[in-house]
Image (spheres, helix red, strand yellow):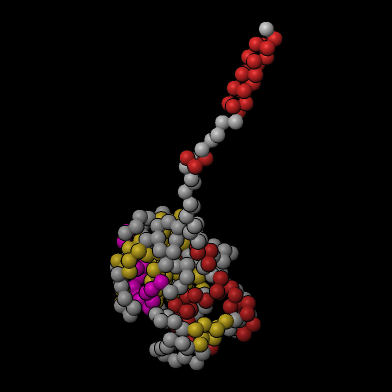
């Protein structure tokens, strides 16, 4: 009787051990998909060249497609100043491989006169470059944002904000994607970044309200128009000008 009870207990114990040591086939588990590398936020590269040059100066090597206006845009300084620093006369021609000196604040002429209140007026007639909502406001204190962002859909029409001449088209300035720069007079430039398609060429004359590009997301994380107004080389709030 004792032997029989012992045998029954042995069988129960054996079944418990066998159940606890069940072999699992790990190879049948689904593998996690490889994560795609996160898209670089080049959005925050705006203005870095300008800030570094203000502190210590720079030497810019001219590349294919560059113009004095595009270099001026990159460094947030008037093209006239850059021309003067480098003894470049009108019509401000530059060639691939030229070394362009960008002076630091130490060597830039300072205006010691009393600062006047900013007057947001010009002789130009302005219109909106896109009718979408402004998703990012202008900020003087933000290195990375020297304009406004206007949301929209890929393919939306983008308009010239005023009469002028196209002085740059291309994607050679990091962080701006497909970019257009228009010169309106000796003081004002406008810039249109992240376009999907550029519909004008350099040296083209454009009229206020003329379609110059289609909205896109080149070098941005979503479809936006990044729009800038530059006065004498410096960024100003576009919403103080456009209706």
Give the left or right position of residue 15, taking residue 29 as reference. right
Q: Quadrant of the C terminus?
A: bottom left
Q: Is residue 59 visible?
A: yes
Does 45 sit above or below residue 185?
above
Q: State the residue lying farthest toward the right.
A: 2
7, 147: nearer the viewer: 7
Give the left or right position of residue 23, taking residue 239 as reference. right
75, 28: nearer the viewer: 28
Q: Is residue 136 visible?
A: no
Q: Give me the residue at 56% from left, 71% from top.
A: 48
Magenta residues span 156-171
Picture quadrant where residue 131 is located: bottom left
Q: State the residue lying farthest toward the top.
A: 1
Q: Quadrant of the N terminus?
A: top right
Q: Give me the residue at 38% from left, 73% from top.
A: 170
Expressed as whole percent of the image width and height from the top left, the position of residue 57 reads: 59, 81
Give the left or right position of residue 7, taking residue 239 as reference. right
169 in magenta? yes
189, 177: nearer the viewer: 177
Does 97 sit above or below residue 157?
below
Q: Give me the residue at 58% from left, 73% from top.
A: 51
52 in magenta? no
């Amino acid at each position: 009787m004792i032997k029989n009870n012992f045998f029954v207990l042995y069988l129960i114990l054996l079944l418990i051990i066998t159940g606890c040591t069940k072999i699992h086939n790990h190879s049948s588990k689904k593998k996690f998909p490889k994560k795609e590398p996160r898209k670089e936020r080049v959005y925050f590269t705006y203005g870095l060249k300008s800030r570094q040059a203000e502190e210590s100066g720079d030497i810019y090597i001219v590349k294919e497609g560059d113009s004095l206006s595009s270099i001026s845009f990159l460094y947030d300084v008037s093209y006239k100043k850059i021309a003067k620093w480098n003894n470049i006369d009108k019509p401000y021609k530059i060639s691939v491989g030229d070394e362009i000196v960008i002076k630091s604040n130490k060597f830039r002429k300072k205006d010691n006169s009393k600062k006047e209140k900013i007057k947001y007026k010009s002789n130009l007639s302005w219109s909106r470059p896109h009718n979408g909502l402004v998703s990012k406001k202008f900020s003087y204190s933000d290195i990375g944002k020297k304009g406004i962002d206007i949301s929209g859909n890929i393919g939306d029409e983008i308009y010239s904000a005023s009469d002028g001449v196209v002085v740059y088209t291309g994607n050679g300035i990091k962080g701006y994607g497909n970019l257009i720069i228009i010169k309106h007079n000796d003081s004002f430039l406008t810039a249109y970044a992240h376009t999907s398609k550029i519909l004008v060429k350099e040296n083209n004359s454009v009229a206020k309200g003329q379609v110059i590009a289609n909205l896109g997301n080149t070098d941005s994380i979503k479809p936006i128009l990044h729009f800038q107004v530059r006065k004498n080389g410096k960024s100003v709030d576009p919403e103080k000008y456009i209706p």
